[in-house]
Amino acid sequence: MLVFNTQDIDIVVSVERIDPEYIKQTIAGEDGRYYLERSRKRGATYRKLYCRLPGWATDETRCVKVDILVPPSLNLPTISASERWFIRNIPTMPIFDLLVMKTQGWWDHHISNREDFRNKEDNDVSDIVALLKRAKFEKVSYVDEVDESRHSREFMSRARTLVNRFVSVHGRNRQWRAIGFDV
């Protein structure tokens, strides 16, 4: 089994137009490993969801931020029930979709005027590199995704554009080629 570290957890909800704050409160209320903190952003009304990692009882810093994402925000595709993968009975989005989503997040942070967003770039890159390894391990292929016509042409075109942008900044041509991108 391959294990990859991540800087945060993204939960993509498959139901459109549901309140992310409700989902955060529900998760925190059901499982003691999760907790909410007020945002430090001035005037923000949302809370941040965190998950305590193993060993948190002896080290309170062992936690990871959990983001709740609802399509179609951030250009996320809606994932049908037949497209979900299950890992230990947990529904997950297809790895290809997740890789595109994370690469979009990297690009948004890379070009942002906000310093706090630009500071996330190193974490984004490490997440993308881990996802590339996982995608290769899972035999994910851009060519297969195009052939399945699961996504719109716009989504697949955006995926190519994002990969080219990533490669122009951080390289990793060989890893992207390994999953079928022509870079």
Image (spheres, rainbow, N blue to C red):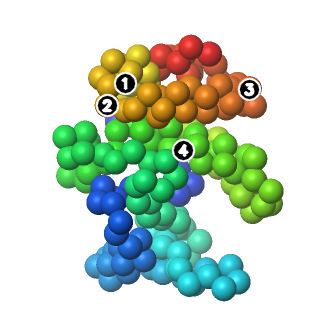
* Numbered label attached to residue 145: 1
Please give the residue where the numbered disc 2 appears in the rendered image. 150
Q: Position of residue 55 (x, y in %)?
A: 47, 68
Tag 1: amino acid: Glu
In which quadrant will I find the N terminus? top left
Q: Residues within 10 Å of mark 2 (few under 14, many from 20)?
A: some
Q: Are marks 4 and 2 in contact (CB under 8 Å)?
A: no
Q: Nearer the viewer, mark 4 or mark 2?
A: 2
- The numbered mark, 1 or 3, whose residue comes first in the sequence reads 1
**Residues at marks 2 and 1, CA–CA distance in whole angstroms:** 7 Å
Residue visible at 53% across and 75% down in the picture? 48
Residue visible at 29% across and 60% down in the picture? 15
- The numbered mark, 1 or 4, whose residue comes first in the sequence reads 4
Q: Are marks 4 and 3 in contact (CB under 8 Å)?
A: no
Q: Position of residue 7 (x, y in %)?
A: 57, 54
Residue visible at 24% across and 45% down in the picture? 80
Tag 3: amino acid: Ser
Q: Residues within 10 Å of mark 1 (few under 14, many from 20)?
A: some
Please give the residue where the numbered disc 3 appears in the rendered image. 168
Q: Position of residue 27 (x, y in %)?
A: 34, 74
Q: Nearer the viewer, mark 1 or mark 4?
A: 1
Secondary structure beneath label 1? helix
| Residue 160 vertical position relative to residue 120 in the rendered view, above or below | above
**Residues at marks 2 and 3, CA–CA distance in whole angstroms:** 27 Å
- The numbered mark, 2 or 3, whose residue comes first in the sequence reads 2
Secondary structure beneath label 3? helix
**Residues at marks 4 and 2, CA–CA distance in whole angstroms:** 19 Å
